[in-house]
Amino acid sequence: MSEGWNIAVLGATGAVGEALLETLAERQFPVGEIFALARNDSAGEHLRFGGKSVIVKDAAEFDWTQAQLAFFAAGVEASAAYVEEATNAGCLVIDLSGLFALEPDVPLVVPDVNPFVLGDYRNRNLIAVPNSLTSQLLTALKPLIDQGGLSRISVTNLLSASGQGKKRWMRWRVRALSC
């Protein structure tokens, strides 16, 4: 094993998982081993990470003690199925599903807004990340909030089809092109 973190990415074949892998490689994050995980037919596929081929493994068969850090980017069902197993194995999980966002013993982190809450992650070996709109909005609004110049906001959120996963996006695309 090389120096660095052993990292699992659950949902590695989805749009967010692929972007996570790409970002980790581009920013030369210190990765020892990378484990690309999926919950469905994607197991057995090959992905590229840092110029190497990585085989996607079935999350149901993964030994979470192999990873020190895991990004859960496969939705609420996957998080519900595997967070407890991963965290009990000592793996720090950063969950992107929103499932744990309102749990009081799980830090909900927007790094540019409230990094100080990270100190509580060891309560459950779990960090929740709000959805992308919330993170972007809070990051942009924080200076106004800090200055006391913001008392209320009203937001309309139009969700992208790609946020529903690659398969649903492809179904939507086929339907849209057939019209």
Image (spheres, rainbow, N blue to C red):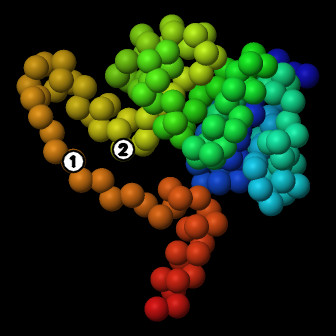
Q: Residues within 10 Å of mark 2 (few under 14, many from 20)?
A: few
Label 2, label 1: how far apart the Cα atoms are: 10 Å
Compare residues 86 and 159 and report the one nearer the observer. Answer: 86
Pointer 2 residue = 133
| Label 2 or label 1, whichever comes before in sequence order | 2
Give the residue at x 81% y 27%.
64
Q: Quadrant of residue 168?
A: bottom right
Compare residues 52 and 126 and report the one nearer the observer. Answer: 126
Q: Quadrant of residue 102?
A: top left
Marks 2 and 1 in Cβ contact (< 8 Å): yes
Would residue 100 be found to the left or right of residue 66 on screen? left
How many marks are shown on the rendered structure? 2
Pointer 1 residue = 155
Residue 86 image position (x, y, % from top left): 74, 26
The amino acid on which the numbered mark 2 sits, given as a three-letter code, is Leu
Would residue 84 be found to the left or right of residue 101 on screen? right
Give the residue at x 80% y 60%.
41
Give the residue at x 75% y 27%.
85
